[in-house]
């Protein structure tokens, strides 16, 4: 592991903003489940203690579906989901690599994750 680098990002309109510290060479998941594929969400997992939300409270709305374990957070103004609480990593936020201001700060390895078959894929990953 290398020294962590600072990243920042948020939604399209700027009402949701965050900063975080991540490993410089993270594994990023490209999930094909019903929600991630529609948003082209690339999952960069950030430990809760390494993430700071800079937005005002109430800038986001929440959506849960299926087992209701994941909390999908969307900007109330522009609708962008820049990060959320994933089912797979309860100790971390999942930040969308596409929503970073400085995605060049990390050298991400994009790893396919078969979210259409979540239970099988999660078991294979040891989740």
Image: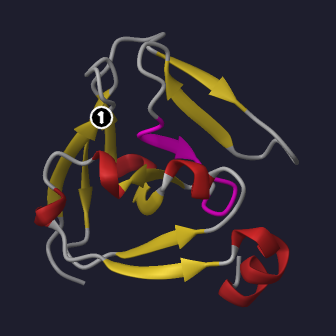
**Viewer-side residue, 46 vs 44:** 44
Please give the residue where the numbered disc 1 appears in the rendered image.
Answer: 10
Q: Which residues are magenta?
A: 81-89
Q: Is residue 3 left or right of residue 83?
A: left
Residue placed at 52% from the left, 28% from the top?
A: 74
Q: Is residue 89 left or right of residue 64?
A: left
Q: Name the main secondary structure of what is drawn in magenta.
A: loop
Residue 75: x percent and y percent?
Answer: 46, 22
Rendered image quadrant of residue 109: bottom left
Residue 36: x percent and y percent?
Answer: 59, 55
Residue 22: x percent and y percent?
Answer: 26, 63
Vertical relation: 31 (above or below) 98: below
> Looking at this rendering, what residue extends furthest in the right direction?
67
Rendered image quadrant of residue 64: top right
Residue placed at 33% from the left, 31% from the top?
A: 11
Q: Is residue 20 left or right of residue 65?
A: left
Residue 88: x percent and y percent?
Answer: 66, 63
Vertical relation: 8 (above or below) 63: below
Its colouring scheme is secondary structure
Vertical relation: 83 (above or below) 112: above
Residue placed at 82% from the left, 82% from the top?
A: 120
Count residues near mark 1 (Cα–Cα under 10 Å), then give few for <14, some for 14-19, many for 20+: many
Residue placed at 15% from the left, 54% from the top?
A: 6
Q: Is residue 87 magenta?
A: yes
Q: Is residue 127 magenta?
A: no
Instruction: Name the quadrant of the C terminus.
Output: bottom right
Count of marks placed on residues: 1
Instruction: Name the quadrant of the N terminus.
Output: bottom left
Vertical relation: 123 (above or below) 99: below
SS under mark 1 = strand
**Viewer-side residue, 52 vs 61:** 61
């Amino acid at each position: 592991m290398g020294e962590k680098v600072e990243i920042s990002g948020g939604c399209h309109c700027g009402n949701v903003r965050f900063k975080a510290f991540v490993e410089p060479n993270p594994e990023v998941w490209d999930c094909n489940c019903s929600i991630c594929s529609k948003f082209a969400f690339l999952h960069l997992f950030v430990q809760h203690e390494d993430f700071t939300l800079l937005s005002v409270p109430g800038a986001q709305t929440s959506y849960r579906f299926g087992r209701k374990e994941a909390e999908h957070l969307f900007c109330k103004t522009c609708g962008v989901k820049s990060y959320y609480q994933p089912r797979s990593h309860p100790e971390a936020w999942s930040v969308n690599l596409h929503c970073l201001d400085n995605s060049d700060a990390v050298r991400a390895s994009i790893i396919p994750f078969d979210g259409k078959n979540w239970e099988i894929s999660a078991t294979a990953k040891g989740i």
